[in-house]
Image (spheres, rainbow, N blue to C red):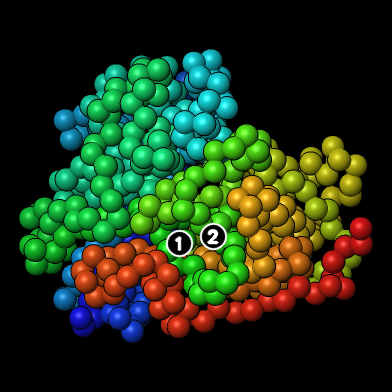
Amino acid sequence: GGTAVVAAVDLGATSGRVILGSVGENELGLRHVARFANDPVAVTEQRRSALHWDVLGLYRAVLTGLADAVRSEPEVASIGVDSWAVDYGLVRDGALLGVPYHYRDERNAAAVTDVHALIAPEDLFARTGLQHLPFNTVFQLQAEASAGRLGLADTALLIPDLIGYWLTGHAATEVTNASTTGLLDPRTRTWDTDLFARLRIPTGLFPRLIQPGEHLGPLLPTVAARLGAPSHLGVAAVGSHDTASAVVAVPATDESSTTAYISSGTWSLVGVELPAPVLSEAAFAANFTNEGGVDDRVRFLTNVSGLWLLSESMRSWEAGGSTPEQRSSGLAELLASAADVTGPVPVFDASDARFLPPGDMPARIDAWCAEHGVAAPRDRAEYVRSILESLAAAYARAVDQAAALSGTTIDTIHIVGGGSQNELLCQLTADATGRTVLAGPVEATAIGNILVQGRALGRVHGSLESLRSLVARTFPPRRYSPRLEGRPLP
Ligand code: LFR
């Protein structure tokens, strides 16, 4: 019984945060402690520009944020860490061997060809249930092998596990994030060791699997001292894949209807939760994925691009600012101007591979329009409107596919994460899908992280459904109904 305070460390691809959560049977409170930018760094490697994560900078920001959290809440009972998926650090004898690559680095094209020469794409899907994304860990490890680096490592740690290792000295692989590597069997949720062998990846590369809710270990004494924390404070495994934590906090309560979710941040993850993976040929053809959820649920979804299209455009316009606060005020202005656009704007394929790497986003939108014989947007407001209309169109397609592939009917769509605050995007999604959109909470990922810690501490109980009803009571979602007159004529 009672309430506990826990700290959620949530690292997104563009910003990170440390949030304190108080959690009890009828209590769910959030307090933002720290927010920091996560800016990748480009460096030259053999005449090409390589993209890396500044993991030490991130770790420093995590330590500073946690120290602030402990100062303002000395009773903090545990810490949970989540981040974007697929990326990792290679480690030998406990030492990081190099700077982790960003999944948007372009080194993977050759690796995809190499892996597919050893195992066909449809066989990879049949074994792992994972959609093809060129940056899935399995391809990145192939790139490391080709560069002669894989053999130097004794361990690979996914990003949240790397942070957890630095905090506690304990190495583990949290299972929801492990499901994004392309090396896990989605039926048994254990490593596909035969696949490791076929790809010549050492079977012991990833440390033991750990489940959300398990205790990773107490803070190292040096870390506890740095944070001013009691030595018994420790790290709990959560759904360390940010999307897994976000899906925990989808406030779906109506069990008579099936709901889809869109976890909307840098990416938009569009899908449904299922009890078992869908490994059909149709799911493969539609590039749907079966990622591991908390409590052995399956996140059956597809990656649609996301607010990345917008943040990267803003970077070209230099309207992005350097702090998270400057970025969000620049965004608010652009969204207001986009809401006022009345004329037609191009609806482009948001999932086109050309939009994946960093660089001039408006120029790439122009190129797409030129190739498809449609007029490009004329000003910033039109670009933003075009991006949001294109995302909404992609969501509509993905929701229809999710319903067809899983044999369900979907009448409600929950949008959680940063995009749930974007009223124009929410309304356009309702319009494009012809379905009710329920928006929020914005901090779904941190909430899912906090709830799993709270349950591990025995402060909340029960299934994901009961956790979700607590979210719905605390953060009632905003409703958007489809505007029929707003829909394009057939
Ligand atoms: C969202 C996310 C997606 C994953 C992408 C890359 O933040 O984790 O689920 O496909 O980032 O890791």
Q: At 79% from the left edge and 45% from the top edge, which residue is drawn?
A: 366
Residue 485 as seen in the image, left or right of residue 207: right
Whether pointer 2 and pointer 1 mark residues with C-beta atoms closer than 8 Å, the reply is yes
Q: Tell me which amino acid carries mark 2.
A: Ser
- Confirm or reject: label 2 Cβ below 8 Å from ligand 1: yes
Q: Residue 223: percent from the left, percent from the top?
A: 14, 56
Q: Tell me which amino acid carries mark 1.
A: Ala
- Looking at the image, residue 291 lies above or below residue 107: below
Which badge, 2 or 1, is on the more N-terminal residue?
1
Q: Residue 1: percent from the left, percent from the top?
A: 20, 81
Residue 57 as seen in the image, left or right of residue 476: left
Q: Quadrant of residue 201?
A: top left
Disc on res. 109: none
- The quarter of the image holding the C terminus is bottom right
At label 2, counting other C-alpha atoms closer than 10 Å, the crowd grade (few under 14, some 14-19, many 20 or more) is many
Disc on res. 246: 1
Q: Secondary structure at mark 2?
A: strand
Q: At 24% from the left edge and 50% from the top edge, which residue is drawn?
A: 164
Residue 48 as seen in the image, left or right of residue 226: right
- Residue 172 versus residue 375: which sits nearer the camera? 172
Q: At 56% from the left edge and 57% from the top edge, which residue is drawn?
A: 272
Q: Badge 2 is on which residue?
A: 263
Q: Secondary structure at mark 1?
A: helix
